Image (cartoon, helix red, strand yellow):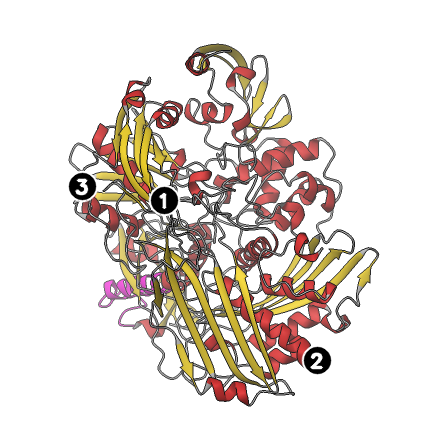
């Protein structure tokens, strides 16, 4: 079987679009049940200490209240399992210790949401308060070096610095950012009479939630069904079975009622992860002609006291450039803070800002064009392994981007470009996002009417999974897309990993590909001895799918329709399972996505207001399954990058650990008028590491924007800002 | 001055209201504290009206009240007496509204889709108000509708298209 796949797939409209534009798509918090009760959590108002008393009398007496469960009387629950994403969050309400502001100390269940929220406000909690550790430099805090064993030492750093003509040694800072998907994280939990459990949850990983709930509540996974057909964004906030999910399931068990729990926006700042702050020191040594001789990237970031978060901020720097002497270091500091978690482009978002800012500083010091500096140090092979990349079109990204952006019009002197009262700056950054794939399964069925049903328990958090998998299955089975239904978001379907790490399209796409090929094989098996079939005795390599059936490769006239085979053999349908495993190329280095980001900023000469005026992004995304949805991923990631660059900072009150700006009125994210029109182009070809040839594009779109904006601000003003977000007060 | 309990008991008290929702007259008794957003979602099942912040900051719950854009989380049902409320369910596939929705689909003006009903209601009102003349104007008047997926440029494309303009 041969597939002549286009490099850029058709720009098919999203298959679920009609439901989304009419308000008919049902997100988890749109689900209701007869007798539905509502839960509201009570959160700690201190960051460290103990609960000494909880008075629930007034809450219990309030109208409509069914139950109040507190940290002092909750049933014992087991902590969820270690999964491929690491440990599960601690089960809630299990003891009297307070480890962070916003920790759940009780949950109230009532007939209506208003009654539950009101009664929650009546729960009186008394604390014995300790002095919380909130600062990354707190001497009391436990520090862990190299938490993931990923620190890199290559060559001789000190020798590399010694031989350099120029050395950059600067420290960069990024703040806490909060994911803030528009959809409030919500769980609806229903225990059935047979002891089984149905949960509608705004998760990026239904099977992960199922695993956690099974362990926590002691129920076999097979009796738990988790549903998430639509999720109002996630950006990492939906990767784990967070404590509110457990609270909702617990509340349903305690009351015997279906229970809905919808987090408030302020609760979204303390209960579902966030991008942790970082402090990063970068040292780069280079020769006068711009060859890197040494690169050191040392990062420190906080983590919660009794939880983990993978955030290897410095690691990608070890693969970024051809440099013989490299050191990367990561450290984590345990503080009294809500647990950080993945937020779109975790680690890269912070690490790339520091590295690509430092490269710009080096270019300025050397008097070399920042574009040339990057090309001179292009890593033609993987610096970590020395192997050739499975694919890498980064140079093409830079070349094409420079041309589209008009980089040659840039005059190098900072402050040299103006347009009226606007100072104009051009900045660029290189970007990469590492490859990631974990095992995934899918199932494909061909119905007697010749239509196909393909499914896997994945989620589509807006990335286009429904659409690209429909297209892919249609192509592989030789059907019109209108004859294919792809469904997801249900743990009764085959196992899928999370939508996250830019890993789902590769994992799921290769599983769908496998299922479709197995399905073709199943048809060939059925007709193997069928004298009436022109396909009799043929192998998978000798046929192609097309026109609603299977035919000899290169001979569309010699074959037959699926419907004919099914009818002749009295089959209502044929199904096949497929699975994918991560690639393990041994002659190439598995490459992720690459990109070049070009940004024009305008800075008000008097007021310091920074506006992003133009963005050109050229991305090596491997094989692109759908030009429209892939472009939207890059556009959206870029908007996230503009937020990181100019607006986003979660502020924690120094004394109490309270989040001081936990609303959309105070935590600023880009609005329509903050975002310019932008150009997105894909270059490169299918990646050679997997049969499908895709690369994840969900995160690369955010990477590099903050650095490109900061570099453009320097070009516009001569001011180097090393701390995000870049705000006008820093320019005054 | 009223006590807290007195104030709260008044909030929980039932209020009689008569108003229209998507062309259907409704006569209801409702707690004074219930927002239009929660009531539309929980009582009428109009879950196309989304809750993104409950604080009037994100625009996901945008509906039309007497033809004007309103964030339903900041309006109480008790304030709706005599008014006509239109939600995304009330404009589905009808005239200009259908054109806006089609344009959103064509231009991929959403990703997760959660903010989309609010964006569409704002877009319909914007075009109706004659405020969709330029991309700059659209950007300004659509800035009350947050989209965390970052579809803003494509939302502008869709509105320009639906308003009969040339998409740049």
Q: Is residue A373 above or below residue A465?
A: below
User: Gap between marks 2 and 1, in whole Å?
Assistant: 53 Å
Horizontal side of A25 relative to A122 (left or right) equals right
* Segment tinted magenta in the rendering: A509-538
| Foreground label between 2 and 1 | 2
Q: In the image, is residue A609 part of the stretch drawn in magenta?
A: no
- Look at the image and tell me in which quarter the N terminus of chain A lies: bottom left
Residue appearing at x 55%, y 19% in the figure = B23
| Mark 3 residue element | loop
Cβ–Cβ under 8 Å for marks 3 and 1: no
Q: In terms of secondary structure, what is the magenta stretch mainly? A: helix
The circle drawn on residue A367 is: 2
Q: SS for tag 2?
A: loop
The picture places residue A654, in percent across and down from the top left corner, at 47, 47
Q: Tell me which label, 2 or 3, sits earlier in the chain.
A: 3
Residue A480: x %, y % from top left: 46, 55
Circle 3 residue: A76
- The chain identifier of the residue carrying mark 2 reads A
Of B131 and A5, nearer the camera is: B131
Number of labels in the image equals 3
Q: Is residue A545 left or right of residue A643?
A: left
The chain identifier of the residue carrying mark 1 reads A
Label 3 vs 1, first from the N-terminus: 3
Residue at horizontal 49%, vertical 37%?
B52
> Is label 2 in contact with label 3 (beta carbons under 8 Å)?
no
Question: Which of the marked residues, 2 or 1, is nearer the chain's N terminus?
Answer: 1
Chain at numbered mark 3: A
Disc 3 from disc 1: Cα separation: 27 Å
Q: Quadrant of the rendered structure where residue B22 is?
A: top right
Q: Residue furthest right?
A: A420
């Amino acid at each position: 079987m041969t597939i002549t796949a286009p490099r850029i797939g058709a720009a098919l409209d999203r298959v679920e679009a009609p439901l989304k534009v009419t308000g008919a798509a049902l997100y988890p918090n749109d689900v209701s049940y007869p007798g539905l009760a509502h839960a509201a959590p009570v959160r700690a108002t201190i960051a460290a200490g103990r609960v000494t008393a909880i008075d629930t009398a007034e809450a219990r007496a309030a109208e409509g209240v069914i139950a109040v469960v507190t940290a002092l009387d909750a049933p014992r629950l087991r902590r969820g399992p270690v999964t491929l994403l690491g440990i599960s969050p601690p089960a809630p309400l299990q003891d009297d210790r307070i480890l962070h502001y916003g920790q759940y100390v009780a949950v109230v269940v009532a007939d209506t949401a208003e009654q539950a929220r009101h009664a929650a406000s009546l729960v009186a909690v008394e604390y014995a308060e300790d002095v919380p550790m909130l600062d990354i430099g707190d001497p009391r805090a436990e520090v862990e070096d190299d938490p993931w064993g990923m620190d890199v030492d290559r060559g001789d750093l000190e020798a590399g610095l010694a031989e350099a003509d120029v050395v950059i040694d600067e420290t960069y800072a990024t703040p806490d950012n909060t994911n803030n998907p528009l959809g409030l994280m919500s769980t609806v939990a229903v225990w059935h009479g047979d002891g089984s459990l149905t949960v509608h949850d705004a998760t990026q990983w239904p099977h992960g939630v199922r695993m956690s709930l099974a362990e926590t509540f002691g129920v076999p996974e097979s009796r738990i069904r988790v549903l998430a057909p639509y999720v109002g964004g996630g950006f990492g906030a939906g990767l784990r079975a967070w404590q509110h999910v457990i609270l909702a399931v617990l509340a349903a068990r305690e009351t015997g009622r279906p229970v809905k729990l919808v987090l408030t926006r302020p609760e979204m700042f303390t209960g579902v992860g966030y991008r942790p702050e970082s402090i990063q020191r970068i040292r780069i040594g280079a020769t006068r002609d711009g060859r890197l001789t040494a690169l050191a990237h040392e990062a420190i970031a906080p983590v919660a006291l009794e939880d983990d978060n993978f955030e290897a901020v410095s690691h990608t720097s070890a693969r970024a450039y051809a440099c013989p002497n490299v050191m990367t270091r990561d450290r984590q500091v345990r503080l009294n803070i809500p647990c950080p978690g993945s937020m779109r482009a975790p680690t890269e978002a912070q690490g790339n800002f520091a590295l690509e800012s430092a490269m710009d500083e080096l270019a300025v010091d050397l008097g070399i064009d920042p574009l040339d500096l990057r090309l001179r140090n292009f890593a033609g092979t993987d610096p970590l392994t020395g192997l050739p990349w499975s694919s890498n079109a980064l140079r093409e990204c830079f070349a094409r981007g420079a041309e589209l952006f008009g980089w040659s019009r840039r005059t190098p002197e900072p402050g040299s470009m103006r347009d009226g009262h606007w100072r104009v700056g051009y900045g660029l950054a290189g970007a990469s996002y590492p490859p990631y794939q974990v095992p995934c399964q899918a199932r494909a069925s061909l119905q007697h009417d010749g239509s196909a049903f393909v499914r896997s328990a994945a989620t589509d958090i807006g990335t286009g999974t429904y659409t690209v998998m429909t297209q892919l299955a249609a192509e592989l089975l030789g059907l019109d897309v209108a004859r294919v239904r792809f469904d997801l978001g249900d743990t009764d379907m085959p196992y899928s990993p999370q939508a996250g790490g830019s890993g789902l399209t590769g994992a799921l796409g290769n599983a769908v590909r496998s299922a479709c090929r197995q399905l073709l094989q199943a048809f060939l098996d059925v007709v193997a001895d069928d004298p009436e079939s022109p396909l009799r005795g043929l192998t998978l390599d000798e046929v192609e799918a097309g026109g609603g059936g299977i035919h000899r490769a290169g001979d569309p006239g010699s074959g037959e329709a699926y419907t004919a085979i099914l009818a002749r053999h009295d089959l209502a349908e044929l199904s096949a399972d497929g699975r994918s495993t991560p690639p393990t190329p041994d002659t190439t280095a598995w490459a992720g996505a690459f990109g070049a980001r070009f940004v024009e900023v305008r800075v008000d000469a008097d007021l310091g207001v920074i506006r992003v005026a133009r963005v050109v992004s050229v991305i090596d995304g491997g094989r692109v399954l759908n030009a429209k949805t892939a472009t939207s991923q890059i556009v959206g990631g870029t908007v996230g990058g503009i937020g990181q660059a100019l607006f986003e900072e979660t502020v924690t009150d120094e004394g109490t650990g309270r989040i001081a700006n936990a609303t959309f009125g105070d935590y600023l994210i880009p609005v329509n008028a903050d975002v310019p029109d932008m150009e997105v182009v894909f270059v490169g070809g299918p990646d050679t590491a997997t049969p499908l040839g895709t690369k994840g594009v969900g995160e690369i779109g955010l990477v590099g924007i903050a650095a490109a904006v900061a570099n453009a601000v320097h070009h516009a003003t001569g001011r180097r800002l090393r701390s995000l977000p870049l705000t006008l007060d820093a320019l005054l | 001055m009223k006590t807290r309990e007195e104030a709260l008991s008044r909030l929980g008290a039932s209020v009689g209201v008569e108003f229209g929702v998507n062309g259907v007259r409704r006569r209801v008794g409702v707690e004074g504290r219930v927002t239009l957003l929660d009531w539309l979602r929980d009582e009428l099942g109009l879950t196309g009206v989304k809750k993104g912040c409950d604080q009037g900051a994100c625009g996901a719950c945008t509906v039309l009240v007497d033809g004007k854009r309103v964030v339903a989380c900041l309006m109480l049902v008790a304030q709706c007496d005599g008014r006509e409320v239109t939600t995304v369910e009330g404009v589905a596939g009808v005239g200009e509204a259908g054109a806006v929705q089609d344009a959103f689909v064509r231009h991929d003006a959403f990703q997760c889709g959660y903010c989309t009903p609010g964006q569409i209601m704002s877009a319909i009102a914007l075009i109706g108000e004659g405020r969709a003349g330029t991309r700059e104007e659209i950007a300004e008047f659509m800035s009350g509708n947050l989209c965390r997926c970052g579809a803003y440029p494509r939302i502008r494309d869709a509105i320009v298209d639906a308003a009969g303009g040339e998409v740049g």
